[in-house]
Image: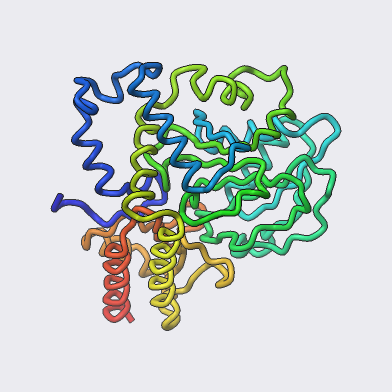
């Protein structure tokens, strides 16, 4: 374990060390079965127990009522960009999308490819997606309002949800799912790829309110209908067994080691506050997100002298700090401080940043 680095990758991302150690112990023989999770039948009792545990723990962490289903769907969040309009925008309907950056833009594009009715109700594109826009005038007739709760590229996050007036809210929460408590009542659907806060890549978690199922057409391709996943309990075909196993362990860690989502939020807040406080001490580091919209998951910044940024990345790697290069579309620096990134890792990053600033003023 001595060669472990501080991992600030935006995704796939750090996993809790205790979870990986448990995976390692169970890799060849899960609970004495003589089989790895990667080898066992997805319809056998052992795996059925795993998927049931993952589903139950997610419901318990969010305090979900029986009005919600928890599904495991192939294709990550990007497939949901296409499935959401396919399942929930009917003939003559226009859904409301709020555009806050790369992933929300891609979701809008996937709906328009299908010639679905889409209205961009608000956008922060005129400010390079550096903030969450003000939202007014949402239609009461829309089948749903779609948001991306955390924007990994620009480092912004919704801290107050838009008032949809009872219209179901659908949210891509890939990068802040299970990071803080959530009032789920406004949501018709929540979805997210597993590879940031829940486990390795390979599946998406979909939290779907049961009344939304009634709106799904019956003439969709089988694997592109959420109705299939509800009726077959995510087992119509072979699900991504190992990622679901990992999710069961991560949610166990969140419940039993961290102490739930309120405790996780407190840790995440401390990490973000420490990092932003260092950035704000002077203008050597320049945050790229508006302060009121700053993310607890992805801290994005530039160096005042941008010519120093390659050196920053080089020296950070030498110090065991990985994954800090900004998204290719915007450059700069990005520290992704998801749930599994420890406070000790953030402290190490802050120490490095302070030393780098003093050396390179």
- Residue 123 screen position, x and y as percent: 70, 57
Q: Nearer the viewer, residue 154 or 240?
A: 240
Q: Residue at x 66, y 36 (%)?
A: 110
Residue 19 appears in which quarter of the rendering?
top left
Q: Is residue 13 above or below residue 93?
A: below
Name the residue at the left extreme: 2
Q: Residue at x 53, y 66 (%)?
A: 294
- Is residue 248 left or right of 94 when viewed as pictured? left
Q: Nearer the viewer, residue 98 or 58?
A: 58
Which quadrant holds the C terminus?
bottom left
Residue 317 appears in which quarter of the rendering?
bottom left
- Residue 340 screen position, x and y as percent: 34, 53
Total numbered badges shown on the rendered structure: 0
Task: Tell me how the rendering is colored.
Answer: rainbow
Residue 265 appears in which quarter of the rendering?
bottom left
Q: Nearer the viewer, residue 29 or 173?
A: 29
Name the residue at the front extreme: 66
- Residue 98 screen position, x and y as percent: 69, 52
Q: Residue at x 35, y 29 (%)?
A: 242
- Residue 336 screen position, x and y as percent: 41, 57
Q: Is residue 233 above or below residue 138?
A: above
Q: Is residue 217 above or below residue 151?
A: above
Q: Residue at x 51, y 52 (%)?
A: 329
């Amino acid at each position: 374990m001595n060669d472990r680095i501080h991992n600030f990758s935006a995704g796939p991302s750090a996993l809790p060390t205790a979870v990986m150690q448990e995976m390692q112990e169970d890799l060849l023989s899960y609970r004495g079965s003589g089989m790895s999770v990667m080898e066992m039948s997805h319809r056998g009792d052992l795996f059925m127990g795993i998927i049931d545990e993952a589903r139950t723990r997610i419901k318990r962490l969010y305090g979900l009522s029986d009005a919600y289903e928890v599904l495991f769907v192939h294709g990550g969040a990007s497939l949901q960009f296409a499935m959401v309009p396919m399942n929930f925008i009917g003939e003559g309907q226009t859904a409301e999308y709020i555009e806050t950056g790369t992933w929300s833009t891609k979701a809008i594009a996937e709906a328009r490819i299908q010639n679905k009715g889409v209205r961009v109700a608000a956008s922060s594109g005129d400010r390079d997606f550096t903030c969450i826009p003000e939202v007014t005038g949402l239609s009461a007739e829309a089948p749903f309002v779609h948001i991306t709760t955390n924007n990994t590229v620009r480092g912004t996050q919704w801290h107050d949800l838009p008032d949809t007036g009872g219209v179901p809210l659908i949210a891509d929460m890939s990068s802040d799912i299970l990071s803080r408590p959530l009032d789920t009542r406004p949501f018709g659907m929540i979805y997210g790829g597993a590879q940031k806060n829940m486990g390795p890549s390979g599946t998406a978690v979909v939290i779907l309110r049961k009344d939304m199922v009634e709106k799904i057409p019956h003439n969709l391709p089988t694997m592109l209908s959420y109705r299939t996943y509800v009726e077959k309990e995510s087992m119509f075909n072979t699900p991504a067994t190992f990622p679901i196993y990992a999710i069961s362990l991560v949610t166990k860690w969140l419940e039993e080691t961290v102490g739930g989502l309120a405790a996780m939020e407190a840790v995440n807040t401390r990490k973000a506050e420490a990092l932003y406080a260092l950035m704000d001490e002077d203008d050597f580091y320049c945050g790229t997100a508006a302060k009121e919209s700053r993310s607890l998951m992805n801290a994005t910044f530039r160096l005042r002298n941008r010519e120093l940024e390659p050196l920053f990345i080089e020296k950070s790697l030498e110090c065991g700090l990985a994954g800090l290069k900004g998204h290719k579309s915007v450059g700069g620096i990005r520290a992704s401080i998801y749930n599994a990134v420890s406070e000790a890792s953030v402290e190490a990053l802050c120490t490095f940043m302070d030393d780098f600033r003093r050396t390179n003023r």
